[in-house]
Amino acid sequence: MLSLSGCWSRIEPKYLGIVNSLIYDVDDEGKFIVHLEFLNAADAGSGDGGKSKGSNYTIRAMGDSPREAIANASQSVDRSIFGGHYKVRFFSEKLAKQSVNPTLDYILRAKITDETTLIGVIKGDKPEKIYEATLDLSDTVGNYIETMSRFLPDSSLKAVFPTTLDFVRDYYSDGKQPVALLVEIVENPSQTPKGEDKGGDGGKGEEKKEYKIVCEGLAAFKDGVLAGYFNGEETRAYNFIMNKVHNIHITVPSETGNTVFGITGSKCKVKTSMDGDKIKIDVKLKFNTNIAAETGEIEINDPKEIKKLEESFNEKLKKDVEGAIKKAQQEFESDIFGFGEFVHDQHPKEWRDMKKDWDEKFKEAEISVSVESRIRRYGEIKRPFRYEEEDK
């Protein structure tokens, strides 16, 4: 009988306000702000600050702490707020520049925290605009970002989608700093409809602005504070070093056009060495590629031309990776690549003395990058398309 009694604290699903995504923000006076997006709650309470949009419902609340802000949100929702199924939790840029530590402390202490939830930063001073953006085939922002995390890495490496567990694990690591998903809300001119005529005099009304969500780049942190951003190209270089490579394509310009390389496999090896107090880090990248397209005049069936293509590919990627590392060293002063973990593994005794000051050591480290690639396949045609036509 005891096993059939059920949970003493159960709440029927119809009485739950299931949060699909939320934003942690802060105002100029230090008050915490939360924006909650509820799933399937378009008919929920109509308190101040809430608005209905399709199958989701968003609300804004304030408090002296993140927990108090969420508690205050209950005053405008006729459901029991349930946060066990977050798809994504965002930090505003303003909060991230101050520190995310107080918010993370609350998140990790909560007994229903889902550590698989994605974590990101919304760029700009109005993060709540994300709930006004076009969501394509998704019905909520949380579902939209989760779907992007599943399919975008298969076609582009210009974004990262770390979970809360990934972020916290890197935060506590002595040799690596965390990164977060970077989201930007931009105007979408192609989908901006014309406003209705006003006054009946044939005049044109104001245009209604439409927004879209752009997931590109990453937000780099240092000790819980936002250190800066990587753009798409730099984020791709970051993913190369982290060995997070899928079947993607990269365009390399030539004298007569562009060559599109399809990357089918890659491997990054990091080797560290000590020269007195100087730390040397060698980053070696190897790629297997295919020729996906050739818009110039390069003869693919010529071994000499193939060698030139591989050298052009190596040069471009080497430049991209070096630029990303230099930015992390000089601008962020934050080891988001985890080179410190390699020093720890390869030089455990020396690491004991340097781990407390690793970010300073990382800033002064001598890092070299080498790229090696091999073109495995050239496609079904060996010459540029127009030459194939001329041969007919």
Image (cartoon, rainbow, N blue to C red):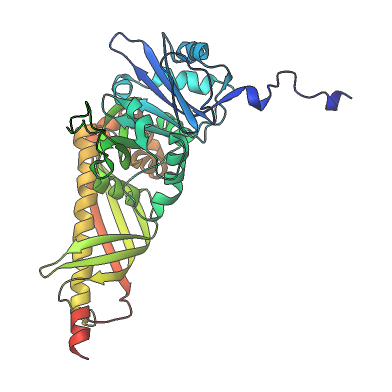
Residue 218 lies in quadrant:
top left
Q: In this view, does 387 lie above or below 267?
A: below
Along the line of sight, which residue is nearer the eye, 271 or 289? Answer: 289
Residue drawn where x is 18% and y is 80% of the image: 386
Residue closest to the eye, 280 or 284 = 284
Q: Does residue 189 appear to the left or right of 171 in the view shown?
A: left
> For the C terminus, which image quadrant?
bottom left
Residue 99 image position (x, y, % from top left): 34, 20
| Left or right of residue 239: residue 196 | left
Q: In which quarter of the image is residue 279?
A: top left
Please, which residue is most extreme toward the front here?
A: 200
Which residue is the extreme one toward the left?
A: 255
Q: In this view, does 29 lie above or below 261?
A: above
Residue name at image x 31 percent, y 48 percent? 158
- How many numbered discs, if any? 0
As drawn, the residue found furthest toward the right would be: 1
Q: In which quarter of the image is residue 358?
A: top left
Relative image position of residue 207 (x, y in whole percent):
22, 33
* Residue 33 image point, x, y percent: 39, 16
Q: Which of 261 and 136 is in front in this view?
A: 136
> As displayed, is residue 249 above or below residue 213?
below
In this rendering, does residue 277 appear at all?
no
